Image (cartoon, rainbow, N blue to C red):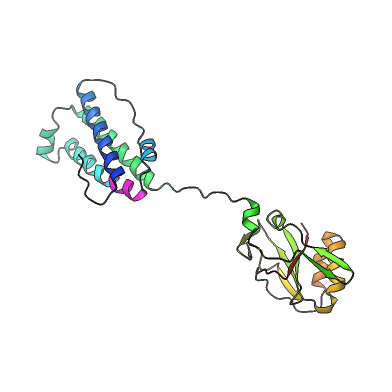
Amino acid sequence: MTKLGTRVTKQAEEVAEHVETWIDGYIENLKNNDYNRKKRLINLLKTYKIKKSDSKYLAQWFANLKDELGEAIDHKDPDLVEGYDFLSPSKLKKLHQFVSEICEDFTKYSKITKKRKTKKPEDIVKTLKYMETFKFGNCDITSFDPVKILECKSFVAYNTKTGDVFYYETDDVFDVKGTTLQNFNVDNSFVKKVGRTSNKLIPKCAEIGRALVKSELLNIKTKSREATGRFNDTTVLVRVLS
């Protein structure tokens, strides 16, 4: 049995035994001039669900054999040259190439990163807090579906508690983490205090042409503040603009 010590799992020990069997078989085929089939180490590693750390260790383990074969080929160690004299120089090089490919596959597997599971849009925005509907004077404004945030380039929101109107714009795609909007353009997005004029302004923003809404908000005389992206259950999602 291969003695790898306690640094690796039982699965890694079993994989090492498989690989050593492959190498022994490869050597026998070389001696007998038989055909050597290509081995698919990556598939074996996936079958055994080897940890990346174990794969890295096994790469180093079999690299010792690769280096040993290299020294025999280069005649750096007389004992190794004598030990492998049952193989011709060309066959020894083939064996070295075979072991090198094994080491490369172990190393490659140790660096494989799993793809993150793609979240559904509904799951991305499910923790975003917002107000379903709010009455502005005689006009009821119902929040748009928050999933549309992930599909649009700009939108307007309003905080019914603080009297702030929010304009958000992105150069790419909006994202949502928890209750916070992300990936918006900080320079082009802004917040303005509306106060009592909200009963007229917000319904107007919901009705006028989309291209006019940003200008309407910029014309508000209060000072623009930097948008933070934070949302809560007093925020109405007024309108998608683009």
Horizontal side of 119 relative to 11 (left or right) equals right
Q: Splitting the image into 4 quarters, where does residue 43 fall?
A: top left
- Residue drawn at point x = 31 percent, y = 48 percent: 54
Q: Splitting the image into 4 quarters, where does residue 31 fall?
A: top left
x and y percent of residue 199 in the render?
86, 73
Give the residues drawn in magenta, as a range.
51-58
Whether 234 is drawn above or below 3: the answer is: below
- Residue drawn at point x = 18 percent, y = 38 percent: 74
- Residue drawn at point x = 75 percent, y = 79 percent: 223
Whether 81 is drawn above or below 135: the answer is: above
x and y percent of residue 193 in the render?
76, 77
Would you say residue 193 sits in the magenta stretch?
no
How many marks do you count on the picture?
Answer: 0
Q: In which quadrant is the C terminus drawn?
A: bottom right
x and y percent of residue 95 in the render?
24, 32
Horizontal side of 57 relative to 210 (left or right) equals left
Foreground of the two, 238 or 136: 136
Whether 160 is drawn above or below 72: the answer is: below
Would you say residue 57 sits in the magenta stretch?
yes
Q: Splitting the image into 4 quarters, where does residue 201 fall?
A: bottom right
x and y percent of residue 132 in the render?
75, 63
